[in-house]
Every structure is written in structure tokens, then in C-alpha cells.
Amino acid sequence: MKSQVLIARLLPALVPALLLGFTLTTTVALPARAAAPTKVATPAETAAQVRSQWAEAKKAYEAAVKPYAGKPEYAATLKQFGETLDATGLALEQYLTLKLAAPPTPATKITPVVDQIAKNLTTLRALQGKAGSGLVTVLGAALGQHNQITQNALKNMR
């Protein structure tokens, strides 16, 4: 009985020591893995990748909306969505051009372009909300892809 009480009192103090010993043992026993060198893309490579991804996403969008294109109830939404998507692509291209410029473009010229991209993406989100039935899913998928490409471009071109 006394040994059980003694163990119950000592166990909370022993657990951290046991865990530390286990951690040290496994750290010493296991060989350290060498970190693989990470290749960082140049701004030009990043811009080329963004352009390629945007073109692929645009093709996928156009293929996905084909079944809805002939339906009059979707015509206005599809027209607006397509125009806004094109405007977003142009603004993104303008952003990439400004970021690749030498000497570096001042922030006062880049900020309005980024603001326009954000405004266009917000408009696309609103247009998706207007869509009916299956079209809302198609537009949501297209918006998600284009939004991801845009966010990656903005992040990687800093």
C-alpha cells in the first residue's frame, strides 16, 4: 500500500524526466535528415507559371459553362462573369508587368492595380451568388481557381 502511494506521488515528477530521456534517446539514435535544397523561382518564372495557370483555369471555366451558355436565364450572369474574369486577368497581367519592370515600380502605381484585382474578385463572388442551380457550383469552382492563382501571384511576386 505504501509503495502505491509512493508511486502515485512520484509519478507526476517522473513523467517529464522519462519523456525527456525518450526524446534524447530517439534524437541521438536516429540519424538527422539533410534538408533538401529548395529552389526558389525567379520572378520571371513565377509570372510565366501564373500566366499558364490562369490560361488553364480560363479554359476549364469555358468548358464548364458550355452547358449553360444557351440558356437565356443564365446569359446575363455568364456574360458579366466572363467580362469580369477577363478584366481580372488583364489587371493581373498588368500587375505582373509592373512587378517585372526594371527599375522597380513604385507602390503608388502597383496599389491601384491590386485594388482593381480585389474589386474584380469581389464582383465575381457577387455574380456567383446570383447564379442559379448548377451554375453556382461551376462559377464557384472557377472563382476558387482564379482566386487561388491570383493570391499566389500576389504572394510570390512581392
Image (spheres, grey):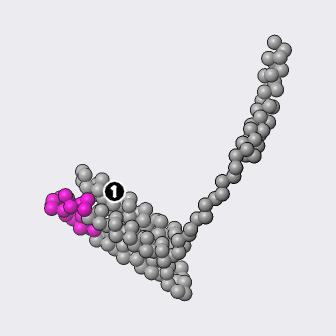
Residue position marked by numbered label 1 in the rendering: 140
The answer to which of 29 and 89 lies nearer the viewer is 29
**Circle 1 Cα neighbour tier, 10 Å, few/some/many (<14 / 14–19 / ≥20):** some
Q: Which image quarter: residue 84? A: bottom left
- Residue 148 located left or right of residue 34: left
Identify which residue is drawn at 34% across, 70% down. 55
Q: Quadrant of the N terminus?
A: top right
Residue 96 visible, this angle: yes
Image coordinates of residue 24 in percent, x first then y, are 76, 43
Q: Is residue 64 magenta?
A: yes
Identify which residue is drawn at 40% across, 77% down. 93
Identify which residue is drawn at 83% across, 17% down. 3
- Residue 91 located left or right of residue 68: right
Q: Quadrant of the C terminus?
A: bottom right
Image coordinates of residue 96 in percent, x first then y, are 45, 77
Residue type at mark 1: give it. Answer: Gly
Using the image, determine if residue 95 lies above or below residue 4.
below
- Residue 139 located left or right of residue 25: left
Residue 88 visible, this angle: no
The answer to which of 90 and 149 lies nearer the viewer is 149
Image coordinates of residue 129 in percent, x first then y, are 31, 56
Q: Is residue 89 magenta?
A: no
Check the image and name the residue furthest to the top: 1
Read off the magenta span: 63-82
Q: Secondary structure at mark 1?
A: helix
Q: Which image quarter: residue 126? A: bottom left
